[in-house]
Amino acid sequence: MANTSSSHNPITLQSGIREYNGNLTEYTGMLGGLTPDVHTLRSLNPETTNRVICVMYRGPYFLMKYFNPYNSYDRTSPFFTYKKVIEYYNMGIQCNIQDQTLATTQLQGGFAGRTIPIPTTQNAQQGQTLAITVPELVGRPMANVHNMWVNGIADQITGLTTYHGLVTGSVDDAGISHQIFNIEGVDEGLDPSPAWEVAEFLIIALDRSGARVEAAVAALGCVPAGQVGSDIFNHTNTGQSELQRLTLTFNCQFVQSTYINDLASRYVNQFAIFGNSLNFNPGAGDAFFQDGSQTIDTDMFNKGQRPHLDGVQTAAGNYPAFRANSNFDQRNGVTDEDSHVTPEKHSLIYTGDQATNGPWEAIPQFGPPNSNTTSTSTR
């Protein structure tokens, strides 16, 4: 009996990653007028692009071994700095996949000589490349490693494979390869082979959330197309200096499969980076707090002492704190004895505040307001 169940899920190029699960069967679509109602949008969910990450999951073994003969996976080696910048600091990824075309042959016959195209094979993909744009850093770690990769495969002067000294020069009776030169006690050699020279990448397109894989492709047999970074030697008279950007171009072959989808999905599940701007932490605690302190008390903030000298008495708070005194203060007039101007008085500043200082108390011109200097009265 035929199986009429609608739960059959065929394996496709999207198996293992995000698949379309909408249902457009009852909608008139563009013909009925495109409307943004919720019911339509549940099934009409257009794909958006430009969220792509790359993962170098295999590196050129000879280069990894050269940078650390004792631990090819040393995370502090120059190679892993190169890998980190490619994966986390890239400024653009361009996959030149070149969609394959389906070749046909012609079946011809009849009195009119009409032809029918018969499909045969997909045309071979030629010239596939992976290009990753990265910023160069001070000390040129990207150009250094990339160009060392190229030179190790084919020396720029001799044209020979050197693997920077790791290439095999001889094989002993036990079948163990040895380098031509014994360097630092390490003499295990590598026979010239593309296996030691290539890298492999996963290129993953993410959905809008960054949590699910929309598409995945593997770039296999990646070798540099050439050296990079020589533009650092260029100079112009414009008086301008620019950031150096490198485009790392690799010759490769792209492949898609459900295995690749599975790897991409597992990688994203484990390594995807999520965040929310509301959780942004500038890491400024050390500028505000001493060790173990709960209050702001660093030298940058006068050890926690708030400024208090000002005209509006901020130390008292933001409410009216002082009551004005409206009591009448009667003043005494100038006595007849002090009313006469004498030569000495021409050099003095007078005040009539007899209640405080006494009548016509002499105060030096630049002295304090409450000077105890007394006037000399001459009649």
Image: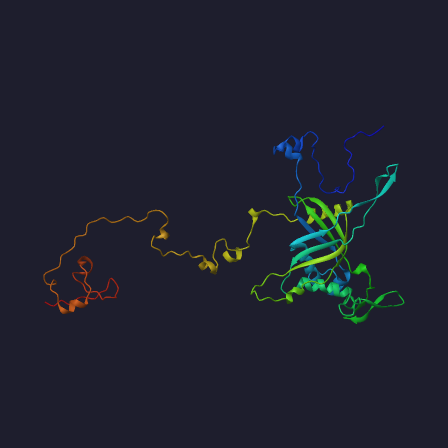
Residue 301 visible? The answer is yes
Closer-to-camera residue (119/205): 119
* Residue positioned most to the top: 1
79 and 225: which one is in front? 225
**Outermost residue toward the right?**
173
**Vertical relation: 299 (above or below) 20:** below
Residue 284 location (% of width, % of height): 53, 55
Observer-nearest residue: 175 or 140?
A: 140
Q: Is residue 68 visible?
A: no
Residue 232: quarter of image: bottom right
Query: Residue 378's image quarter?
Result: bottom left
**In the visual, does 5 lie left or right of 310?**
right
317 horizontally vs 108: left or right: left
- Image location of residue 209, percent across then percent down: 64, 44
Q: Residue at x 65, y 64 (%)?
A: 231
Image vertical order of residue 308 relative to residue 101, above or below: below
Q: Quadrant of the N terminus?
A: top right
Q: Is residue 297 above or below residue 123?
A: below
How many discs mark residues in the rendered view?
0
Residue in the foreground of this view, choosing between 186 and 29: 29
In percent of width and height, residue 125 lies at 79, 51
Question: In the rendered view, how is the structure colored?
Answer: rainbow
Say which quarter of the image contains residue 119.
top right
Q: Position of residue 342 (x, y in %)?
A: 13, 67
On the rendered image, what quadrant is the C terminus found in?
Answer: bottom left
Specify whether 271 is left or right of 278. Answer: right
Q: Residue at x 75, y 66 (%)?
A: 151
